[in-house]
Image (cartoon, rainbow, N blue to C red):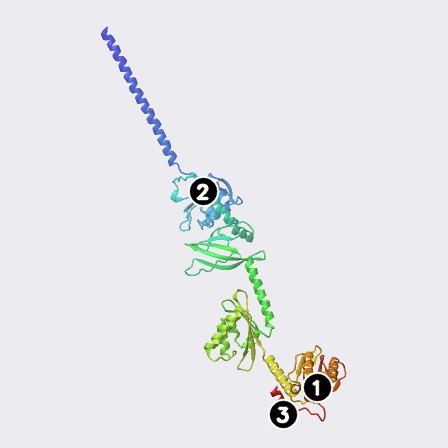
Amino acid sequence: MFADGAMVLGAAVLCGSASVVLGVLGVRLIDRRISGGGRAGMSASLDAPIQPMVFLFRDGTLVDATAPARALLDRIGPPDDDWGRLMRWIGPRIPVAREQMQQLARLGRLDLRGGEGQGAATLRLLAEDMGEGVARITLCDPQAEHAGIVVDSMSLQAMEEELGLLRTALDQTPMLIWRQDAQDRITWANAAYLRRAENRHHGALGWPLPRLLESPRPVPGAGTATRRAALEEHGQVSWYDVHSHRTGDQTMMFALPADAAVRAERSMRDFLQTLTKTFADLPIGLAIFDQRRNLQLFNPALIDLTRLPAGFLTARPTLFDFLDQLRELRMVPEPKDYRSWRQHMANLESAAATGHHVETWSLPSGQTYRVTGRPHPDGAVAFLFENITKEMTLTRKFRADLLLGTTVLDGLEDALLVFDSHGQIILHNEAYRAIWGEGEETLCATISAWEARIGAGPALAALRDALGRAFEDRPLSGAMAGPGDRLLGWTLTPLSGDRAMLRFRAVAGQPVPGRAELFEAVGDY
């Protein structure tokens, strides 16, 4: 009986041990299955390909697209023409894409690659003709076709915000901005350029984009160039200053509106033409030199006066070249030596630049020029050349006539005194000075001098009264005792121009001193 109990106990222990072993094995088996399934699921999740970028078009109209494809369309432009937007985005990366896509129905399948060396990521385009006008287009990056890239969400958001800001700024700027490749094909353009191109070509644009403005000619050894170009649209011309900046095999173009500058320059040219036409009729030669002392403006009279060749003047010579050429033509005063002449010309230039300056040039040819220098704004200087030969000739003749008249009056024996209606003494001759001494400036002072010489008396009072009536139509006359008790007859005669002449003459029997005595009296005085 004891043996039966032991056997029962052993069987119970054996069954318990077996249960424990089986439980452990079950747990491990379940753990393996769970672990194996998780690893396989994780591996499948990591190795799963990224969702492709696929477009489905029917006769150029988008029928369906994957999520990345729709996101791309949303980023590259407004939703007006899906096919046109996609081709404009693909064109810079695969330039032959548009041409090849037109042959898709004949070829059935296209596999195109591009993007290398153009500053953009590599791109693969797979196009398949599905029949009945349906085309399936797949875009991918062949270098990252089976790779997934993890990007920090905050960094991605910052980049997208910056990209949006830059895109908005470029699309809102009034400048026309575009990019050209080495073959001068336009690979990118901002919204302002696209709008002008659409208005010019009356509709949607294709690829490649049309050229609106001529590019500046490249400068050897420089990465930048500038030129002014015109854009005509519906009969209206717009002007732009086009700047180019080359980077690698790409060139960025910036066209700044220049209508205001062109209008200002045109107004300046019209103003200069008006001045030129006005100055063309002037007999005075005009030469305007800028702040660098280069000739900027002259009139035909300058050529006539200076005999300088028109070709020399149109070449815009400097001021000193201009004066040197005048010296060669003997159109300046003959200097003692070149150094003094050069210094004189330098003084002329500095005096004209600081204020109004006038010189008279007596030329070897006998002509006389008046040269006037005037400063202008911004440091410019204007010179006026005027031929005053006739004026100087008339002045010399007038002076000679005056000298002759004075000599004739001084040769008369009668003493003459001429005054005007205001009592100002105009002239008196040598005979008058011999009798009365040097004349006074006014008639009142003259009468006082007479009274001091001969004293007051009825005769002098009568002369004073006659002088008050000197401008009557009839002459007045009388006699009085002059200096040295000489009897003098006087005659008061009105002249033209509110003037009157008083003449003293010695009365017969009381002659005035002879010529020798007169000169002696003047010398003694």
Q: Crowding near pointer 1: few (<14 within 10 Å), some, many (20+)?
A: some
Q: Position of residue 192 (x, y in %)?
A: 53, 51
On residue 516, the disc is 3
Which label's residue is closer to the chain start, 2 or 1? 2
The answer to whether residue 48 is left or right of residue 496 is left
Residue 137 visible at all: no
Measure how far apart labels 2 and 1 are at the Cα level. 112 Å
Query: Which secondary structure lies at badge 3?
Result: helix
Which label's residue is closer to the chain start, 3 or 1? 1
Residue wearing tag 2 = 158
222 and 339: which is toward the camera? 339
Q: Crowding near pointer 2: few (<14 within 10 Å), some, many (20+)?
A: few
Q: Position of residue 443 (x, y in %)?
A: 69, 79
User: The C terminus appears in which quarter of the rendering?
Assistant: bottom right
Amino acid type indicated by mark 3: Ala
Which label's residue is closer to the chain start, 2 or 3? 2
Query: Which secondary structure lies at badge 1?
Result: strand
Amino acid type indicated by mark 1: Arg
Please report contact status of discs 3 and 1: CB closer than 8 Å, yes or no: no
Could you tell me which residue is drawn at 47 percent across and 39 percent down?
Answer: 67
Residue wearing tag 1 = 503
Measure how far apart labels 2 and 3 are at the Cα level. 118 Å
Amino acid type indicated by mark 2: Ala
Please report contact status of discs 2 and 3: CB closer than 8 Å, yes or no: no
**From the viewer's perspective, is residue 43 above or below residue 204?**
above
Q: Position of residue 127 (x, y in %)?
A: 45, 44
Residue 178 visible at all: yes
- Viewer-nearest of labels 2 and 3? 3
